Amino acid sequence: LCIAETCPSCSVTVLSDQFSPNTTSDVAAGILIPHTYPGTPIHVQKQWFKETFTYLFAISNSAEASEAGIHLVSGWQVFRNTPKEELPFWSDVVLGFRPMSEAELQKFPQHQFGQAFTTLKCDCPPYLLWLEKRLKASGVQMYTRKVADLWELHSEYNIVVNCTGIGAHQLVGDEKLFPVRGQVLKVHAPWVKNFIRDGDGLTYIYPGIHRVTLGGTRQKENWSLFPDPGTTKDIFDRCCSLEPSLRGAQDIKVKVGLRPSRHWVRLQREVLSQGGVKLLVVHNYGHGAGGFSVHMGTAKEAARLVGECIAALQGTSSRAKL
Ligand SMILES: Cc1cc2nc3c(=O)[nH]c(=O)nc-3n(C[C@H](O)[C@H](O)[C@H](O)COP(=O)(O)OP(=O)(O)OC[C@H]3O[C@@H](n4cnc5c(N)ncnc54)[C@H](O)[C@@H]3O)c2cc1C
Ligand SMILES: O=C(O)CCC(=O)C(=O)O
């Protein structure tokens, strides 16, 4: 979408073996709380987060908000022990970040420190459909197709943007990319209005417009997409210990996704070449546990790299497919 919007002369096609609701992004809780990529400078990560926050905040303040599934949510991140770093790098991007008061902490007898703030939350399946609608309105073509090798696209396209998430492990043989399996529950509990996140990152409760997401697990190198019933019970019990009223939650649905994890998001240009023929590639994958929180910032950077590729192509003769 960023490419279609920033480069109207390009003809953009989306190829994917799965669309919503069958992607990792559909499983995400969709909360805007960044995770840290150890291999990326913090100021860059902050910029990605800020751009994403600003973009979604504008949607949350528009008539599109409910169709796009975006809303503000306030809540608490609680810690059993006071963390070394009391101010995360994103604290001045979210709204109203402050330490929790004694009165608020009384709700969490097992925790001794906490942070209160307001952030954005997205119901990912409606958001993805909303994005698809905007893509189609911009004239973008969408086809179901599994790509076995990027090179197979060279005769049809000048530039390939690789946003395949965990699929890049097989597609480009990236050994630095690994799955971190996450299981979550989506429940009906409309009285839960505030988010609660245990600072260890394992247990969280995120109310959305229609359902509340309860999490979670972080299982490195586990490729299983099958829900585990023992894990479902464990997640439910952990969440009920943070918010006992959840015992009354109904219609529990279980989802599993594989976080496309890497020490840094692979956001770079590459030139593939065979027999003197070149294919320009922009990679944008490896967003791990925080892909939703930085999606617009990284998409803008990917679109900028596509702009560089176009400039390079304009200096050559292979412009026919643009
Ligand atoms: C349980 C869980 C909870 C999460 N919660 C949050 C959260 O609250 N906040 C947050 O910021 N992040 C969260 N995340 C992380 C977030 O979901 C990911 O970072 C993000 O979804 C990655 O998006 P993506 O588009 O790169 O990958 P995907 O959503 O997996 O999309 C990749 C697409 O590429 C297609 N594809 C792959 N290989 C090929 C191929 N060879 N040919 C054609 N198409 C291909 C796939 O079909 C898919 O459509 C969560 C993740 C999980 C698992
Ligand atoms: O970490 C969080 O609190 C949000 C959910 C998430 O990003 C995840 O489970 O990976």
Image (spheres, rainbow, N blue to C red):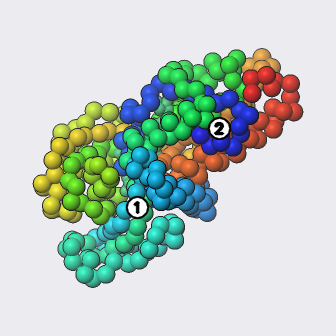
At label 1, which amino acid type do we have?
Answer: Leu
* Quarter of the image where one finds residue 5: top right
Label 1: few (<14), some or many (≥20) within 10 Å? some
Question: In the rendered view, would you say 52 is above or below 269?
Answer: below
Residue in the image at 46% along x and 70% along y: 95
Q: Is 265 or 197 nearer to us in this picture?
A: 197
Name the residue at the left extreme. 248
- In the image, 90: left or right of 234? right
Label 2 sits on a secondary structure element that is: helix
Residue in the image at 20% along x and 53% along y: 189
Label 1 sits on a secondary structure element that is: strand
- Which percent across, then down, holds residue 63? 46, 53
Marks 1 and 2, how far apart in space? Answer: 28 Å
Disc sitting over residue 72 in the figure: 1
- Which percent across, then down, holds residue 219? 34, 44
Name the residue at the bottom extreme. 102
- In the image, 79: left or right of 157? left
Disc sitting over residue 187 in the figure: none
Q: Do labels 1 and 2 touch, CB within 8 Å?
A: no
Label 2: few (<14), some or many (≥20) within 10 Å? some
- In the image, 90: left or right of 241? right
Residue in the image at 55% along x and 55% along y: 55
Q: Is 84 or 72 nearer to us in this picture?
A: 72
Residue 260 appears in the rendering: no
- Which percent across, then down, holds residue 83? 39, 72
**Mark 1 close to ligand 1, CB under 8 Å:** no
Tag 2 residue: 4
At label 2, which amino acid type do we have?
Answer: Ala
The image quadrant where one finds the N terminus is top right
